[in-house]
Amino acid sequence: MEIPFIDLKSQYKRIEEKIKKNINNVFKHGKFILGPEVYELEERLAEYVGVKNCITCSSGTDALLLALMACGVQRGDMIFTTPFTFMSTAEVISLLGAIPVFVDIDPTTFNINPNELKKAIEAVDKRDPSIYPLPRILLYEEDNFTKKAIIAVDLFGLCADYNEINKIAEQMGIYVIEDGAQSFGGEYFGKKACSLAHIGCTSFFPAKPLGCYGDGGAIFVESDEVAELIRSLRVHGQGRNKYENLRIGINGRLDTIQAAVLLAKLEIFDDEIKKRQIVANRYTQKLKASPYVKTPYVPEQLLSAWAQYSIVVKDRDGLINFLKKGNIPTNIYYPRPIHLQKAFNYLGYKEGDMKISEDIAKNIVSLPMHPYLDEKTQEYIVDRVIEFYNQ
Ligand SMILES: *Cc1c(COP(=O)(O)O)cnc(C)c1O
């Protein structure tokens, strides 16, 4: 029997009645677009995160896109971000004609490294790629490029170093956007993930810590003014009514049915986050003695949402194949850093530009991780890992 990598079936069993009741209500009232569940969910999520406004939307990708649009990002703007992330983070920058400026990660947290960020900014200011690798467009074109924002990613559920990142951004007068697609439910110095920057974004893709049964996402922002702007952008830049359009926007709404699903899942979410801690701690306790496995590091005062439990290992391919034979699934997040993806060839980055990301990409692997992973199954997984290295 295959062990699930993420166990949505056990979760569904637990809340089946509530999910069915909530979805049935939507069928009954028929308000499939921006129905009452959407607004109720936004209120609950804002309260949960501790930010005044929550605007739900069609995906985590659209959350990031809307956040950049709300910051007024346009052609020629420079956005600093990490190359060790999912495609979306950098994709939305390019979609708006802005320029991703990649900044390497910290090898222990896998998140954007503030010291590298400072170097990248200096390199941009001096147009000097010997200080830090830069997108070639900055060197060969005479346009007026503007430093506009930083997108930090809370990879695998662990919040980035916002104390440092926000300080750097404040000095430069630019925005910080938190890509909390993997960290919803996590904490940073007593504050919840998605509340740590000017704008917080998350995803409700089924496999994320809080997932719906399709695509979904949300944006968190303290400012009422920005929230209103995002609400307008979410529906074709609409004004007071459907047929008044103030700006260019998108169709970026969350379906009412997905909101109904999320309302049911939110009730057990805190308990699930607690269970994730137990599962992650068990892995770490059992694996940390192995010299071939580097277990994840969680700094003091941080609580990971454990979207993934990722280890850095020796002979990764050998381990993956060995585990596969024992019906243990694994995943690699991410096999190729974004700056080396074909889609970003036009930026002119090359191998060796982001050494830590490239090195981690070669040696990282994620083990099954979800709140319903029982101790016996987990012991079996760990035993197989240890066994592989004892061969
Ligand atoms: C999943 C993810 C996204 C995109 O979310 P979707 O809902 O799939 O569009 C963005 N950033 C990160 C870091 C993610 O993991």
Image (cartoon, grey):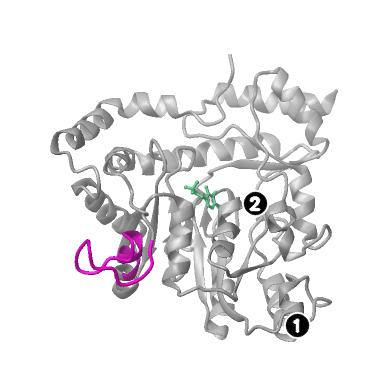
Q: Can residue 186 be seen in this view?
A: no
185 with respect to 113 (left or right): left
Q: Is residue 273 visible?
A: yes
Q: Quadrant of residue 210?
A: top left
Q: Earlier in the sequence, mark 1 or mark 2?
A: 1
Instruction: Assess whether residue 200 is covered by the magenta stretch.
Output: no
Residue closer to the observer: 211 or 31: 31
- Work out whether 125 lies above or below 258: below
The residue indicated by pointer 2 is: 297
Q: Residue furthest front?
A: 243
Q: Is residue 333 left or right of residue 169?
A: right
Label 1 crowd bin: few (<14), some (14–19), many (20+), radius 10 Å:
some
Residue 131, image x, y percentages: 80, 77
Magenta region, residue range: 229-249
Residue position marked by numbered label 1 in the rendering: 127
Front residue of 355/183: it is 355
